[in-house]
Image (cartoon, rainbow, N blue to C red):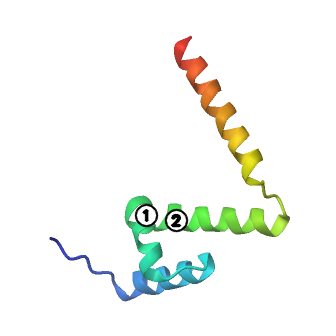
Amino acid sequence: MTALALSQVEMKRLERLAKEAGRTPRALFKFVLRDGFEETERTITAVRSRMRSGATLGHAEAMERLDQLLSDAKQKKAA
């Protein structure tokens, strides 16, 4: 197993992003590894912005939209 080390600057950035996301640095680290700092920061900013604006969906509506999106993609692929 390979150990990863973050610089002090990266660690501070991870701690700041984790605080903004309401997570621990350890919990957020897997997203940073997968997506990178920039994408993780962009996602957190977008989610927080939508939450502040009240533009949230209930579970049922979110599932309906997802079903429609998948159906549209399947039809597009078949065409």
For the residue marked with disc 2, what is the amino acid?
A: Thr
Q: Does residue 23 sit above or below 34 in this rendering?
A: below
Contact check, label 2 and label 1, Cβ < 8 Å: yes
Badge 2, how many Cα within 10 Å: few under 14, some, many 20+? many
Residue appearing at x 62%, y 79% in the figure: 20
Which residue corresponds to mark 2?
40
Image location (x, y in percent) of residue 50: 76, 62
Q: Nearer the viewer, residue 54 or 42?
A: 54
Q: In this picture, is 3 found above or below 38?
A: below
Q: Quadrant of residue 6?
A: bottom left
Q: Position of residue 78 (x, y in %)?
A: 53, 13
Residue 49 lies in quadrant? bottom right
User: For mark 1, does the 10 Å Cα neighbourhood hold few (<14), some (14 to 19), or many (20 or more) residues?
Assistant: few
Quadrant placement of the N terminus: bottom left
Local secondary structure at mark 2: helix
Question: Percent from the top left, x then y, of residue 53?
Answer: 84, 65
Q: Secondary structure at mark 1?
A: helix
Q: Is residue 51 above or below residue 67?
A: below
Which image quarter is the C terminus in?
top right
Residue picked out by circle 1: 36
